[in-house]
Structure formats: structure tokens, C-alpha cells
Amino acid sequence: MKNKILLCGSKGRMGQAISRIAVDHNCEITAPVDQGDDAAEKINDCDVVIDFLPSRCHPTYG
């Protein structure tokens, strides 16, 4: 079973790097989010959160 990842900052350099290697590590980016997206709507469907957003635009996870 693949780990489902909520990836905050998915459009940035680190987010893109994680997206490229996720499949090699039995993971799937099921919820790519960025600044302005509502991560709270997607968090319940994920096993793991990886957060590369700067602190100034950090979402509330609920």
C-alpha cells in the first residue's frame, strides 16, 4: 500500500523534488497544496504531511 502524502509547497523547488522521487519510495502525492490552498480539506485523506511552505504563508491544519 502506498503512503498518501499531503505536500505543502508542491510548486517550489523542494516540493518538485519530493514529487519526482515519491514513486520510488512507495508514496503518492495525493494532495499537492500551495500558498492560498486549503490543506484542511485534504488532510483526512493523507497518511503523511510534508511541509515546505515558508512560515509566512503557513496554512492551518485544524
Image: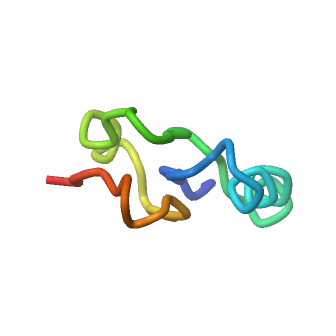
The image shows residue 45, relative to residue 53, as above or below, that is above
- Given residues 52 and 62, the one toward you in this image is 52
Location of the N terminus (image quadrant): bottom right
Query: Residue 17: x percent and y percent?
Result: 81, 59
Question: At x 21% / y 53%, what residue is drawn?
Answer: 60
Task: Name the residue at 83% across, 60% down.
Answer: 21
Q: Residue furthest left?
A: 62
The residue located at (69%, 50%) in the rendering is 12
**Which is more toward the observer, 34 or 46?**
34
* Drawn side of residue 47 relative to residue 23, left or right: left
- The x, y position of residue 18, in whole percent, is 74, 60
**Quadrant of the image occupied by residue 36:** top left
Indicate the position of residue 34 as horizontal and vertical percent values. Answer: 50, 41
**Lateral position of residue 3 relative to residue 16, left or right:** left
Q: Nearer the viewer, residue 38 or 58?
A: 58
Q: Nearer the viewer, residue 18 or 46?
A: 18
